[in-house]
Amino acid sequence: MSKIKSGDYVLFFYNDSKKWLMKVSKKEQFHSHIGIIKHADAIGKEFGSRLTTNKDKYVYALKPSIHYYVMKMQHGTQIVYPKDFGYIAARTGLQTGQKIVEIGTGSGSLTTFMASIVSPRGHVHTFDVEPKFMSIAQKNLEKAGMLKYVTMNKKDLKKAKKMPVVDADIVVIDLGDPWEVLPQARKMLKGSGFVVAICPTMNQLERLSTAFIVNEFSDIECTEHIIRNIEAREGKTRHSFRGIGHTTYIAIAR
């Protein structure tokens, strides 16, 4: 069984709206409306254990999944949400051992997810031109334990003559003008490889779709993914009033 050690990240879960992701340390404690959560009470216990606060409320000490690392990460830019991760992975066949190129690191949410899938034998090569965002992304990757599977590069691939990566399985583009790097993406991809573009607006999607044809990509698909949460309770189940609506469109081609 996996036991909690000092320095581990733990998700202290009270309910769906009250949960805290923390790096535990023997001398630390967290004060909240449900009482004091002493980190020392979690250290040495198994992940999944129930802890009691000084107000006689209990929380679960859970091992964080990538979902929670992403949802609790520091944002420097708009992130790609977990609701889009699963479809991207399924549609492209994302799997361990693959070589991934990401153009536009942003806050590193998609970087973190892809690294968690391709590890331990695969690798993500991510490129950005903004040092501030790259610094935030690096901290987020370190927190999730994924930095060793990622190489971060400060480089503008729009101006690159020689491609820094070849035979990539997937190229992900998260830029305001993704069509500008399609020729570079094509050079870096292996035959039958996938390109995935994150497009917040339909204007971008329309222009990108035209550029796919010009650059001789096929198997083109554009989608939007919206999750509707359900408040499931005995005798009064209904749709949740909270939720994430439109965040982005996903364009995929080969």
Image (cartoon, rainbow, N blue to C red):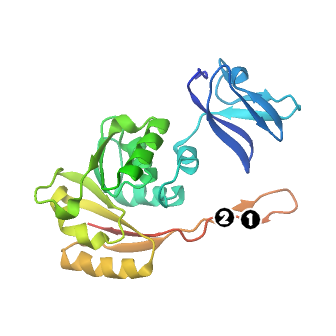
* Relative horizontal placement of residue 149, taking residue 241 as reference (left or right): left
| Among the 4 quarters of the image, the one containing residue 174 | bottom left
Viewer-closest of 32 and 231: 32
Label pair 2/1, CB-CB below 8 angstroms: yes
Viewer-closest of 170 and 153: 153
Query: Vertically, is 42 above or below 83?
Result: above
Query: Vertically, is 220 above or below 90?
Result: below
Q: Which residue is mark 1?
A: 240
**Residue 241 visible within the image:** yes
Residue 212 appears at what percent x and percent y?
Answer: 25, 75
Q: Amino acid at mark 2?
A: Gly
Measure the alpha-carbon separation of dots 2 and 1: 7 Å
Query: Vertically, is 228 above or below 30?
Result: below
Density class for disc 2 (Cα within 10 Å; few <14, some 14-19, many ≥20) is few
* Residue at position x 55%, y 41% in the image: 65
Q: Amino acid at mark 1?
A: Ser
Viewer-closest of 57 and 119: 57
Q: Quadrant of the C terminus?
A: bottom left
Does dot 2 land on a helix, a strand or a loop? loop
Q: Which residue is mark 2?
A: 243
* Relative horizontal placement of residue 241, taking residue 246 as reference (left or right): right
* Relative horizontal placement of residue 93, taking residue 213 as reference (left or right): right
Residue 61 appears at what percent x and percent y?
Answer: 68, 32
Residue 150 appears at what percent x and percent y?
Answer: 33, 41
